[in-house]
Image (spheres, grey):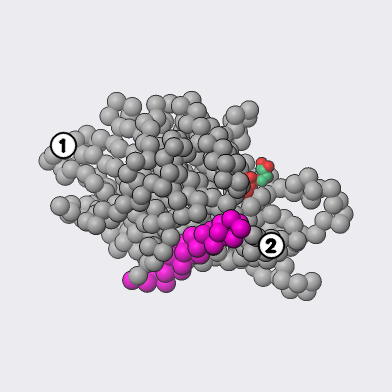
Amino acid sequence: RRPPSPARARPAADHDATADLCRVRVALRIRPKNTDELAQGADFDTCVELQPECKKLKLKKNNWASESYQFDEIFGENSSQKRIYEVVAKPVVESVLEGYNGTVMAYGQTGTGKTYTVGQLGKEDPSERGIMVRALEHILSSMSLETDSVAVSYLQLYLESVQDLLAPEKTNIPIVEDPKTGEVSLPGAAIVEIKDLEHVCQLLQIGETNRHAANTKMNTESSRSHAILIIHLQRSLKIKEETTVSIPSDTEHTLPGDLPLVLKSKLLIVDLAGSERIDKSGSEGHMIEEAKFINLSLSSLGKCINALAENSSHIPTRDSKLTRMLRDSFGGTARTSLVVTIGPSARHHSETSSTVLFGQRAMKVVNTIRLKEE
Ligand code: ADP
């Protein structure tokens, strides 16, 4: 039973502002020079110039020409993890707390700072904590521990197989989509209820250790797999009958009258596999297999982004497990943020350029269903 279209709590906005609100937000982050790059001293050559004040990036095409690209935000090499969280992830988390699904993704070449941005645990220095820890900290501080619950699943997608990073014996976890609601679930994957921030850090550490162990066993690198943290949130709102609430129409809940109102939502935080073209490095054996699957999942994500950007009636989510997992949390009523990461060196011009273009395409995606409702 679908609820009637609820009254919206948000202020009315004009069309353009609403479209902007519903668009996938895309931020670009550049990593500081690494030791190798610093060692090049005056010989270091860069192909990018940031103009953070006007949110633009200039990418050198050759010695004479460069192209300018606009993003929602540009983060220079000194930008803090706190600021990244506040701009990239916080609006999505707030939306998830209201009952919408959401996704935060990091995309870029290996070594450009995806894991640092998303998965850094900040064990020694809490200011280094990445989006996963901060999102859970934010959620824990915003919910009532008596009536609400938050639980996580932590998964790795490698060679089109879903592995459980919290219960490593579980591999080949199926992805199931409810034909009626479109809700995606992973039967068999561990879902661990979170109590406090210390528990969060322990679980993420277990996930990181298992990811490392699994990859060593498979003789591969973590940059070859996607790491996906799913945060499941269930909130009980005690409402009076005359209260107006904002309810996402695709969220499972009981209607006013069946008090209390239960909102279920989820947030996916995704550390994508390196976007570099792997065939470049002279791959052989299992690496060719890896290249095939990474290219498949990232290119199918790209195709979905293109289809959403063009407002196409068919979004090809079935082409890969990555897009099947994202199906109910990307586009539609879900709020999405993408951070694309690049390095400063001109040596990686072609990878940097393809990352920038991927981000530019994602900026065109408007979450249409939400737009109609608002
Ligand atoms: P990726 O996940 O894209 O392969 P990593 O997150 O592992 O890249 O980053 C590569 C290295 O650069 C790591 O040692 C990481 O700590 C460092 N690094 C990346 N981004 C930053 C940053 N913004 N500030 C400081 N160090 C960074």
Residue drawn at point x = 48 percent, y = 45 percent: 156
Q: Is residue 341 magenta?
A: no
How many labels, in total? Answer: 2
- On the rendered structure, is 348 left or right of 188? right
What SS does tag 2 mark? loop
Q: Is residue 294 above or below residue 202?
A: below
Tell me, yes or no, if residue 166 can be seen here.
Answer: yes
Circle 1: residue type = Leu
Residue that lies at the very extreme toward the left in this rendered image: 257
Circle 2: residue type = Gly
**Which span of residues is magenta-colored?**
285-313
State which mark lies toward you, 2 or 1. 2
- On the rendered structure, is 307 left or right of 358? left
Q: Which residue is mark 2?
A: 282
* Quadrant of the rendered image holding ligand 1: top right
Q: Which residue is mark 1?
A: 259
Residue that lies at the very extreme toward the front in this rendered image: 285
Query: Along the line of sight, which residue is nearer the eye, 25 or 341?
Result: 341
Query: Along the line of sight, which residue is nearer the eye, 11 or 122?
Result: 122
Question: How much space separates mark 2 and mark 1, taking CA atoms?
Answer: 61 Å
Residue drawn at point x = 30 percent, y = 32 percent: 148
What SS does tag 1 mark? loop
Check disc 1: other Cα within 10 Å, few if <14, some if 14-19, many if 20+. Answer: some
Point out residue 115 in the picture as x, y percentages from the top left corner: 58, 44
